[in-house]
Image: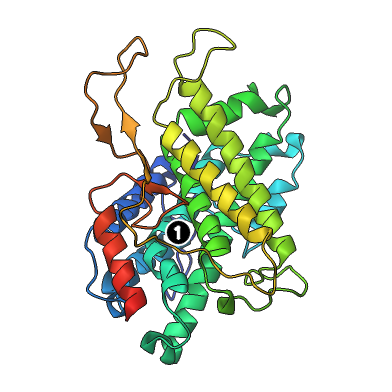
Amino acid sequence: MQFNSAKQIISGGPPISIRPVATVCFICHMLDIVFEATLEHKNIPESTFHILNSTKTTYLQHRIDELKAKIPFDLLLLIQDGTLPLFLSLSPTQLETMRVMDVLMVSMLFNSTICIIYRTCLYLTSFLTLTSPQLLVPENLTKLLMVLETCVTSARTITALNTWILNLPATTDVTPGVTGYKLRHNVFMEQSFTYFALFEAAVVLWFVTTKTQTFWWRNTIGGSGEVLSMTLEDRRIIRSEVLDLLHTLRDLEELHSMKRKVGDEVVPNMITPLVRCVAGMVDEMEQIENSSPTTRKPLDAYDDDDSLDFVVLGMKAMMIDGSPNVDERMDVPWVFLGLLGVDVGKMRWNGALESQWRSFWKRSVAQ
């Protein structure tokens, strides 16, 4: 972890230089915002009105904007300012002059933090209909379009970085003494919150391609290219990006597994619920693609028939030798934020508040 030259502060006079800030300080700040956001999501709102007018969301948005202004421009990659495409186009020689690990960690965590802050607002693009009273307010329409565009952009920044890492030659030095394989290992194995970011990106892109109502997209049949475009080609490209996320998660699952030798079965571990969940997301995305454009509609975001059999995604404790623990209790998977009551096919997230969120969305649809 290295120190970075902070941006200058302009306050009506000459620029004021401040001391260099270690990357870990920016990461801690982002994790603090994530913590506050996840705490907020533990409070089930009274109605969709309270989601749209949440003072906590506004406060967290202000905090992340303030932090963005403090992060050095060469440390944070964004699509909007062109830093992401520029980074992805750099040669290995050019990358040797950069703090690649720091750039990846900060950029992935920053963009996943944005997705977490807006998650419940994003869900409203599925649960609110055109006749909903909330959408009769122009400000709400504008806000949800901003949320949709911001979340898609942030999620696809994460997928772009993941795909870039996956495509690095395993034997090519990216930074002195670090091969592509070692970079993948260091980014995701040693910094667990980076694979949490992969899951956040998967949730957003799965949701917008399978649950978001079609009227939110500017065009569904014409040319692609805009953030708020969702043509068949857009869907296929996004699904390929999520498939790359799944590839990375499966590699991580194998690395975390206590396999004795090549050919042994992967022992379930903390990555396994994420692999199963994202694989189910990819299946749903493909299902939507294969439906007729004239009859295509979002898949139900939840199934209100609780009598059906659902697979609950969670973690089970294992003995040190890899054998199952006698304790059959299932723990909550390790991620920043679960699915908040939304089902992936016939899979449900194991979490204390998942059923309460599911009931909330059911009431929202009925309003």
Q: Please state the horizontal and vertical placement of residue 216, each as a whole percent of the image.
A: 56, 77
Q: Please state the horizontal and vertical placement of residue 56, each as a whole percent of the image.
A: 27, 69
State whether residue 281 appears in this view: yes
Q: How is the image coloured?
A: rainbow
Taking 108 as reference, is 363 left or right? left
The residue located at (31%, 19%) in the rendering is 318
The residue located at (46%, 34%) in the rendering is 1
Taking 96 as reference, is 111 left or right? left
The residue located at (46%, 60%) in the rendering is 68
Q: Secondary structure at mark 1?
A: helix
Q: Which of the pair 103/187 is nearer the observer?
A: 187
Taking 220 as reference, is 186 left or right? left
* Amino acid type at image mark 1: Cys
* Badge 1: residue crowd in 10 Å (few <14, some 14–19, many ≥20): many
Q: Which residue is mark 1?
A: 115
Q: Residue furthest front?
A: 307
Give the answer, above or below, for where 181 lies relative to 291.
above
Quadrant occupied by the C terminus: bottom left
Q: Which of the pair 353/306 is nearer the observer?
A: 306
What count of labels does the image hold?
1
Q: Please state the horizontal and vertical placement of residue 316, each as a whole percent of the image.
A: 31, 28
Give the answer, above or below, for where 340 lies relative to 283.
below
Give the answer, above or below, for where 339 lies relative to 194.
below
Q: Which of the pair 17/359 is nearer the observer?
A: 359
Give the answer, above or below, for where 147 lies relative to 86.
below
The residue located at (41%, 73%) in the rendering is 127
Q: Please state the horizontal and vertical placement of residue 22, each as a whole percent of the image.
A: 42, 41
Q: Which of the pair 191/283 is nearer the observer?
A: 283
